[in-house]
Amino acid sequence: MLNRDMGRERISLVGADFPPPDSVVFELGAGELSQSTASPEWLDRLKSEFGTASSITDCLPYLESFLPEARQFWDQTRDGELVSDFWTQKDPSGGEIHLLACALALDGKRLLLIRSVDDLYHKSEREQQHAHASVKQLKLAALWQRGLEKLAKSPKNSEPVLNETETKDVLTGITSRQRFEELFELELLMASEQDEPLSLIYLDIDQFQLMNEQYGSAAGDAYLSSIGQLVEGALSSPKDVAARVGGEEFAALLPGMGGTEAVRLAHTLGGMIRVLRVPDPISRGLLSATVSIGVVTRPSKSDETMAQMLSVVEGAVREAKRNGPGRIVIGDVPI
Amino acid sequence: MLVQKKICVIGEFGVGKTSLISRYVDSIFSEKYHTTVGVKIDKKQCHVGDDLVSLVIWDLAGESPLRTLKPAQVRGASGFLLVADGTRADTIDIAIALQRKVTEILGPVPFIFAVNKHDLLEQWCVGPDVADMLRGRGWDVRYSSAKTGVGVEEMFVDLASRLIDSEDAIDAES
């Protein structure tokens, strides 16, 4: 039973000695909250900052968020209780007070009990810290696992290595595969948020290995570097991303761009690359090639993932290769 | 004139929300990780032109905020500070989703996106391209360090200033 006259002095009952209460009770009547018990010491400290004329929400701003919820509870419930989240605020001296509010419906009375909860708070704090540490460890373990899988899959002495710890591809200076995938995920989120389309162009240099064998890897590297710069230079929006995504594969990620525009850009890129002539640093001859191109567009209000879009665009590039050099194939986004 | 404004500080756990507030309000930084349980409310006054703004800063616990963010705790805020950790790419994704969620509750209020832990720049996995991309979307992206204080004071004062500007714009319209 709640005692209206409960004071702050120690209370003796049948020989036992109880500490002064650390809580305060308010009763809701005629739309207003009135204090039913004496103020605990922490409330006096808070009131001293605002003066006696202050409202309860001046002293306890968290109630602005809890009271609407409590009023709803009081309106709907016969008897019971609704407990708030913990909240922490500072007293005038800068000391922290951890509090918990409880809305009670008891024999037709609508009561709000607020108490300081240092012990409970610190217990929850420890539990939460353990939970956070576990999440961090799990994420770290997943990162290691992915790294090990990539290492196991990568052939030894393979084609030019992309520096996957960097955001830039070392050879071409444009975005690396790893960073491209991170940006791709971000752009998918943004596209969903903004209800915008997202297009992706994949370019694979035709007969690049032949060029490498015929002119040597220095010539191949020079050609790749020029293609990287050309693709990046052809993109007009600061949101667009040009990336080297494989040995002789490049990608253009185009946020906000629809299919028609993307296909037009693919044609432009294909044409620019066809007429590109790159000096071979050794023989001084001119290197040229064509590219097979795949294009995929995720329309607005759709939810294809990065893996789905990559699968479609890679399939389109394979089909373009089969049809002959310098072709463009538009991929269908899977349903 | 004294104007009181509620702002919320939102972001994934461990990104440094509480540390940013401590740096701004009390000019202190602790290396020890203190998780916030529930909500922590702080106050600080700053000058914006002729106005004295009393910022009531609600630090919302970063316990999986995408799932646990409570609209009641956000309501009434005039703006918010969105925080991510430059060393954790996932916190950027979460911040982007949180921005959407908070804007659904508050409408288009002013906000600043703080990519925090600038003192650990060598460990960052967030490049300037991400900031450029978000700025391209109209976001006010800042780099901050609660540890060194870089960017912190300016961020809160600029947000306060934008809250006043936004209030003035609403007054002018009405």
Image (cartoon, coloured by chain):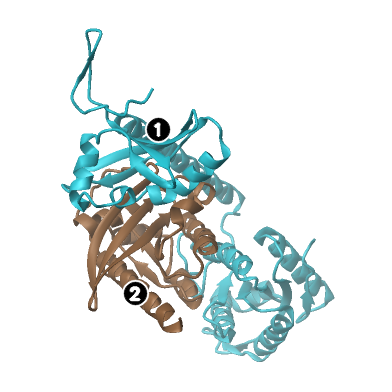
Q: Colour of chain B?
A: brown
Given the current orientation, which residue lies at the most extreme left position? A93
Q: Is any part of residue A91 visible from this angle?
A: no
Q: Residue at horizontal 58%, vertical 62%?
A: A185
The percent coordinates of residue A217 (x first, y second) are 56, 73
Q: In which quarter of the image is the C terminus of chain B?
A: bottom left
Q: Is any part of residue A75 visible from this angle?
A: yes
The percent coordinates of residue A147 (x first, y second) are 53, 49
Residue nearest the viewer, comparing A78 with A284: A78
The chain that hosts pointer 1 is A
Left-right relation of A156 to A320? left
* Residue type, label 2: Ile
Q: Residues within 10 Å of mark 2 (few under 14, many from 20)?
A: some
Q: Residue at horizontal 43%, vertical 78%?
A: B170
The chain that hosts pointer 2 is B
* Image-quadrant location for residue A123: top left
* Chain that appears cyan: A
Q: Are marks 2 and 1 on the same chain?
A: no
Q: How many labels does the image show?
A: 2
* Residue type, label 1: Glu
As drawn, the label of residue A127 is: 1
Is A22 rendered above or below residue A225? above
Q: Residue at horizontal 20%, vertical 35%?
A: A41
Residue at which label 2 appears: B164
Alpha-carbon span between mark 2 and mark 1: 40 Å
The percent coordinates of residue A99 (x first, y second) are 33, 38
Residue nearest the viewer, comparing A33 with A319: A33
